[in-house]
């Protein structure tokens, strides 16, 4: 873990992606039920120094292809030496075996990504046969206190009740997540096992996460789930999920929930916030976040390679 953390810090110093994982957070990735670190990860070392890493996260469905999500990076001081080619080349063989165990006979694709404008990464993916397929924005709120003071009034919509996330509401939140995102690009249903791992993670903040309910029927209608990460100048509230079930759309639930979560995040000591969003979100999420005070900082492009 210390070697991995040092490598990620070296990458962050160059990429400036606001990624500051803790060793506890890295260790938690070994507990993910959709990551097989023993067979689906690889690290490159120069002596005791980790200079490259790669691991894969399986999806819960092949719809229609099973898309193995890849996470990896190379020490900036060692880029251009072939490490990225070696890691991604190894991944193609490792992914096939793990894929065949989960979805035999189904098509397989590898999915990765990079910051738009990162010429070396874009050349590497093109060289290996990847194609850019989707764009995502990293949106930031640098001064949470100022942004919260300027938030528009977002009272709880009529007939709706907000509840703090708790174990007894976890199944309701999962139900909303799967309904809210089933019309989004590349989304597959989350399983109870994967959901339990996410909501038990060391970064998850239930006190800044909320579930919206229909007051009369008790039906869950919306969620905002948050994590917290250390940053150079304070604590950041990362908004991991914002979603509204179809039965709750067009009622202002998402904006009210997020405004509520931001105020609570400020109250518990966070000084900034960030989130990621599909640039072509079918629900107009980009505009919602801009109205609440987020600004786009970086754009990421998803790179995809179909292996057959």
Image: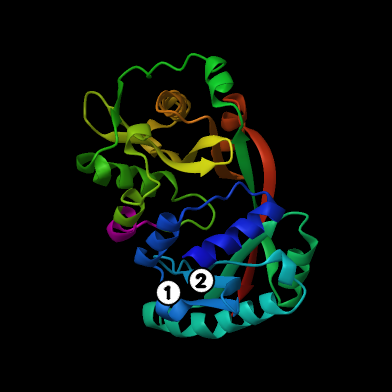
Q: Residue at x 46, y 17 (%)?
A: 154
Q: Nearer the viewer, residue 55 or 21?
A: 21
Dot placed on the residue nearer the N-terminal end, 2 or 1: 1
Q: Decide: few, some or many residues near mark 1? Use Cα within 10 Å; few <14, some 14-19, many ≥20.
A: some
Q: Quadrant of residue 86?
A: bottom right
Q: Nearer the viewer, residue 272 or 296?
A: 272
Q: What number is the disc on residue 113? A: none
Q: Residue at x 73, y 67 (%)?
A: 77
Does residue 113 show up magenta in the picture?
Answer: no
Residue 216 in picture, x, y percent from top left: 22, 24
Q: Residue at x 25, y 34 (%)?
A: 219
80 sits to left or right of 290: right
**Placement of 301 over or under 44, stated as above or below:** above
- Per the rendered image, the range of residues in magenta is 189-195
Look at the numbered disc 1 and give the secondary structure of its residue. helix
Q: Which residue is mark 1?
A: 37
Q: What is the distance, in whole Å, between disc 2 and disc 1 at their CAs? A: 7 Å
* Quarter of the image where the C terminus is located: bottom right
Residue 203 in picture, x, y percent from top left: 40, 47
Q: Which residue is mark 2?
A: 55
**Placement of 149 over or under 52, stated as above or below:** above
Q: Quadrant of residue 161?
A: top left
**Is there a contact, CB below 8 Å, between mark 2 and mark 1?**
yes
Viewer can see residue 59:
yes
């Amino acid at each position: 873990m210390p070697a991995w953390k040092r490598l990620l810090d070296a990458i962050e110093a160059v990429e400036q992606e606001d990624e500051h994982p803790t060793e506890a957070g890295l260790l938690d990735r070994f507990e993910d039920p959709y990551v097989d670190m023993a067979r689906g990860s690889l690290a490159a070392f120069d002596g005791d120094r980790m200079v490259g890493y790669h691991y894969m996260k399986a999806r819960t469905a092949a719809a229609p292809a099973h898309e193995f999500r890849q996470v990896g990076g190379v020490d900036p001081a060692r880029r251009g030496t072939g490490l990225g080619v070696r890691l991604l080349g190894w991944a193609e063989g490792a992914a096939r075996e793990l894929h065949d165990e989960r979805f035999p006979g189904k098509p397989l694709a590898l999915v990765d990504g990079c910051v738009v404008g990162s010429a070396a990464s874009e050349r590497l993916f093109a060289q290996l046969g990847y194609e850019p397929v989707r764009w995502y924005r990293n949106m930031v709120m640098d001064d949470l206190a100022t942004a919260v003071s300027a938030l528009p009034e977002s009272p709880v919509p009529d007939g709706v009740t907000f509840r703090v996330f708790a174990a007894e509401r976890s199944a309701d939140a999962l139900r909303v997540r799967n309904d809210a995102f089933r019309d989004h690009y590349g989304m597959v249903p989350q399983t109870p096992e994967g959901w339990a791992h996410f909501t038990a993670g060391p970064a998850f903040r239930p006190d800044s996460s909320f579930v919206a309910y229909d007051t009369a029927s008790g039906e869950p209608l919306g969620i905002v789930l948050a994590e917290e990460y250390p940053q150079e100048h304070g604590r950041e509230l990362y908004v991991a999920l914002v979603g509204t079930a179809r039965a709750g759309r067009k009622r202002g639930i998402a904006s009210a929930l997020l405004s509520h979560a931001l105020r609570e995040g400020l109250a518990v000591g966070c000084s900034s916030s960030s989130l990621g969003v599909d640039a072509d979100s079918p629900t107009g999420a980009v505009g919602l976040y801009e109205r609440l005070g987020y600004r786009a900082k970086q754009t990421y492009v998803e790179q995809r390679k179909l292996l057959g």
